[in-house]
Image: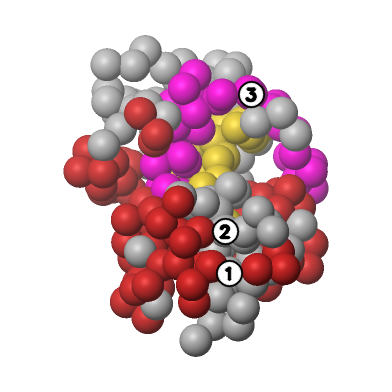
Amino acid sequence: MANLLAYFELGRIEGGCDEAGRGCLSGPVVAAAVILDPAKPIAALNDSKQINEKNRLLLRDQIMSEAIAYAIGIVTHEEIDEINILNASFLAMHRAVDQLTVQPEFLLIDGNRFKAYPNIPHACIIKGDGKYQSIAAASILAKTKRDEIMEQLHEEFPVYQWKKNKGYPTTDHRSAIAEHGPSPHHRMTFRLLPDKSQLVLFE
């Protein structure tokens, strides 16, 4: 069991934020913001990448039922191409915080950079999803939501095997791009293939 910290500073409402899908070639970037209830600790919380899919889904349900507030923010692949992935990650987190039903007094952000949210101070925590419970909870909600989106897109475009690779740049994913070209859901500003001149339109 991971021994994550319950808070950054005792006595205030803290929201943890994390995103999923930043390094993917297709689909949106998804962020979550979570305010956990100190009276309802979730013992098995950890960085979503350290938890298998079955346990992530169980934890997702527990987080959603026991958190004081949670929300998801989504930035589309078109928006990513327009504003770049770093700004898209910040925007997704802002959209998640926008939708919280309780306003946090402080934000804990996974990573080393963030665009300040209006009127709410924050701290950037490198590898925060393995250090703080609220960030770990956000990482689980963001990851499970994004996986769900990619599994739905897989039904439309099964050649890319998104059900398996979730849009990450695996060998199989890149081979499918080389053979069929990019889909309407690919991020065209990303290096989809080592040599962009190899790209053909989707067949």
User: Whole-percent x and y of residue 116?
Assistant: 79, 41
Colouring convention used in this rendered image of the protein: secondary structure
- Mark 2–mark 1 Cα distance, whole angstroms, equals 6 Å
Using the image, tell me which numbered label, if any, was put on residue 186.
Answer: 1
Marks 3, 2: nearer the viewer = 2
Q: Is residue 195 left or right of residue 139?
A: right
Identity of the residue drawn at 47% across and 22% down: 130
Q: Amino acid at mark 1?
A: His
Q: Is residue 17 left or right of residue 48?
A: right
Given residues 178 and 67, the one toward you in this image is 178
Given residues 195 and 88, the one toward you in this image is 195
Q: Pointer 2 and pointer 1: residues touching (CB < 8 Å)?
A: yes
Q: Quadrant of residue 95?
A: bottom right
User: Whole-percent x and y of residue 136?
Assistant: 44, 32
Q: Which residues are magenta?
A: 114-143
Identify the residue under disc 2.
Answer: 25
Q: Pointer 1 and pointer 3: residues touching (CB < 8 Å)?
A: no
**Which class describes the residues within 10 Å of circle 2: few (<14), some (14-19), or many (20+)?**
many
N-terminal of the pair, mark 3 or mark 2, is 2
- Mark 1–mark 3 Cα distance, whole angstroms, equals 30 Å
